[in-house]
Amino acid sequence: MSAPVLRPMLPGTGKLLKETWGDYTQRFWTYIGISVIPTIVTLLLVAFGVGGALLGQDTLRSSYLVAGGGIMVLIIAIIAAIIIYLWSAVALLYAMVHASEGVGVQESFRQSWRKIGSYFWISFISGVIAIGGFLLGVIPGIIFSVWFMFALYIFLSEGDRGFQALLKSREYARNYWWPVFGRTLLMGLIVGGIYIVFIIFASIGSALALEGTGVEAVLQILQQLLSIVITPFAMLFSLRIYTNLKSIKGQVILGAEAQKDKKLITWLTVLGFLMPLIILILVVTVVAR
């Protein structure tokens, strides 16, 4: 009788947190520098766009041409803000994946520009699949979310795009679903706990503050800063899980099981894309009656 095959264990949450903290503190200013740029630029673009819209509103009666120009400025500002956000998201992940190369803020943005399209496509497919999974139930939605959570890391680390990145993510998570889920859940609880504490103190501060003191604006700024600080740490934690799985499994080669998973991914994508449209059409039809 052959002895059972023992799989290497994924490092515990404590060790992963310690490793993540080391990565985070070592390149803290690089990650913060990348994270703060979209916030500043978006605020400027929103101010610019709102100013254009107000200009259009004020001149609506006197000049439809100027009004149309103001609205166009707002639309352009929104599109530009979305592009800046996506570009910064890719740059942040690129800086993390290529941390050993010592890439800085400028180099991360430079290398990430041509990757925005593929990044968006993988994010879009992952989101649609998650919707398809949750339409089948909460548990299937959670299962599929864990399967494909490494797709973006794989794209920037190994160069795989689209469904290929999703299939590889599934392979890395294979036989390690519970360890990945458990560690990710604990990280989520830690982040959620920090936000809950902040919300409690913010609510107390808001309740005690006098009207017109600008406390609400200060709290919103602090919440944005908290997000800028926490988000890179949470992303690095997931990256640590991925790199440890990669060390355990080596370079993943997609086989026959991956082809079966591809069919599942395809059906989930179709389900996640079509069902919300069908539900929307039904709702609109009922309301219109």
Image (cartoon, rainbow, N blue to C red):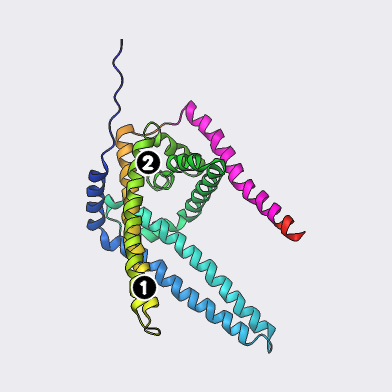
Asked whether the residues under the numbered discs 2 and 1 touch, taking CB atoms below 8 Å apart as contact, a structural biologist would say no
Q: Say whether residue 257 is visible.
A: yes
Instruction: Tell me: residue 196, above or below residue 207.
Output: above
Report the residue marked by disc 1.
219
Residue 66 image point, x, y percent: 64, 84
| Quadrant in which residue 52 is drawn | bottom right
Q: What residue type is labelled 2?
A: Phe
- Horizontally, residue 282 falls left or right of residue 96, namely right
Instruction: Tell me: residue 214, above or below residue 41.
Output: below
Please state, as top left, top right, bottom left or bottom right, where the N terminus lies in the image: top left
Please state, as top left, top right, bottom left or bottom right, where the C terminus lies in the image: bottom right
Q: Which residue is drawn at 31% across and 55% down?
A: 233
- How far, Cα to Cα, is label 2 from label 1? 33 Å
Residue 109 image point, x, y percent: 39, 61
Frontmost residue, 208 versus 230: 208
Q: Is the magenta stretch mostly helix, strand or loop?
A: helix
Whether residue 262 is in magenta: the answer is: yes
Q: What residue type is labelled 1?
A: Leu
The part of the chain drawn in magenta is 254-283
Report the residue marked by disc 2.
181
